[in-house]
Amino acid sequence: MTAGAAALAERTQGGVAMLPANSALAEEVHFFHNWILMPIITGISLFVLALLLWIIVRYNAKANPNPRKFSHNTLIEIIWTGIPILILLFIALPSFDLLYKEDIVPDGKQATYRGDGQTADFVFANDFAEGRTIVRAKHIEVYVESPSGRTKLTHRDDYRLDGLGDPEIVVQFENPPAAGDSVIVRGGRSIVGRGERAAIAMAPTMTIKAIGYQWNWQYSYPDFGDFDFFSNLLPEEQATPETWLLDVDNRVVVPVGETIRLITTANDVIHSWALPAFTIKIDAVPGRINETWFAADREGVYYGQCSEICGVKHAYMPIAVEVVSRPEFEAWIDEQRALAGMEPMFGEDVKLASAAAGDNGN
Ligand SMILES: [Cu+2]
């Protein structure tokens, strides 16, 4: 399969770095690892190594035959307690931010309005759950889409916001958008991505439930009907040397670019659903539901493995996620529904229409 080959091409044989990130949030996690954790760890290791060498050379029995007998030094003890506390705090703050982002499923939404050349005020319903209503301008993004493309507008320069914190927020333009232009307003309190990529994350378009068993995964897509399937290790003779122990007979299929809510549980012992390209690792615990989310940037096949020692075949229950276009995803859903004896949900007409349109606005 070509998509599988593309995903494998992203891997480096014998590489030691992390797999390429395939989501805005994964990029943030990689930045944290590569530019905050690694430099600190490297610095500490080199510092301790230097101290050890110094002690070995300067204070060995030959070089220092008569050691001094003191056992405390208040100043140095305060320093070597205080500095690690500061380092830990420096690491903890950004890591709490990332943990929070991985834990809270985004609730962002988008509204599209048509410009008519006269209307300058556009009303955006601030109807988020309690504690998630929008009170700050940074949680609103405004775009104008014209035949020449989409432009992101700047708060205060291009538009003003009235009613932050109220049930209705009014986006006010100084100059009414031209007739035929679309005004796109996005709102939500989950912002993911670094720098230029920072954007409001949209609410999930679907939920996937993963249940861990000794030793395979079962998946269901409750938004698309009452079907489920098991995902088993692909036998060695059907896999390539690169995909052996990673690929499965039935992959998880998700549309590219959309927010997917993932809930996990287990049927017997604790398993863990881990997928490095999305920087996800979430325990699947019997009798409990855990929740996280991801939104893939690129199409392809991405591999992960159960990451909680769960018995003798722990190494033989891999995870394979196939990221496809929206039309391909809908065709796959209809296929799964047909296997379970259900009517198609998207239908031939819908599929053909969206395939003709090429990309379905990911
Ligand atoms: Cu397991």
Image (cartoon, rainbow, N blue to C red):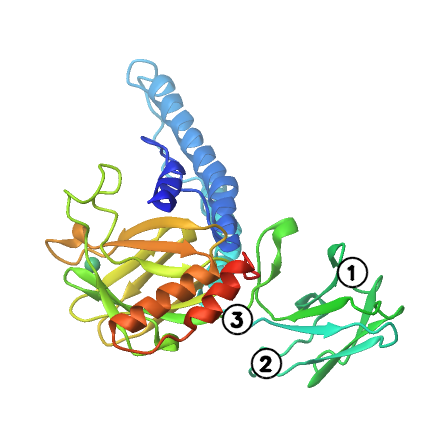
Q: Can residue 245 be seen in this view?
A: yes
Q: What amino acid is labelled 3 in the image?
A: Ala
* Disc 2 to disc 1: CB gap under 8 Å: no
Q: How crowded is mark 1: few (under 14 residues within 10 Å), some or many (20 or more)?
A: few
State how far apart marks 2 and 3 are (Cα). Answer: 11 Å
Q: Is residue 210 above or below residue 70?
A: below
Image coordinates of residue 230 in percent, x first then y, are 21, 64
Q: Is residue 226 above or below residue 283?
A: below
Measuring 30% from the left and 17% from the top, which residue is drawn there? 65
Tell me if 219 is positioned left or right of 259 in this view.
left
Front-lying residue, 60 or 152: 152
The answer to which of marks 2 and 1 sits earlier in the sequence is 2
Label 1 belongs to which residue? 154
Q: What amino acid is labelled 1 in the image?
A: Thr
Q: What secondary structure is found at the residue carrying circle 1?
A: loop
Image coordinates of residue 175 in percent, x first then y, are 89, 68
Q: What secondary structure is found at the residue carrying circle 2?
A: loop
The answer to which of marks 2 and 3 sits earlier in the sequence is 2
Label 2 belongs to which residue? 128
Front-lying residue, 318 or 139: 318
2 vs 3, front mark: 3
Quarter of the rendered image showing ligand 1: bottom left
Image coordinates of residue 48 in percent, x first then y, are 40, 31
Label 3 belongs to which residue? 203
Q: Residues within 10 Å of mark 3 (few under 14, many from 20)?
A: some
Q: What amino acid is labelled 2 in the image?
A: Phe
The quarter of the picture where residue 173 lies is bottom right
Measuring 46% from the left and 66% from the top, which residue is drawn there? 351
Q: Is residue 224 above or below residue 44?
A: below
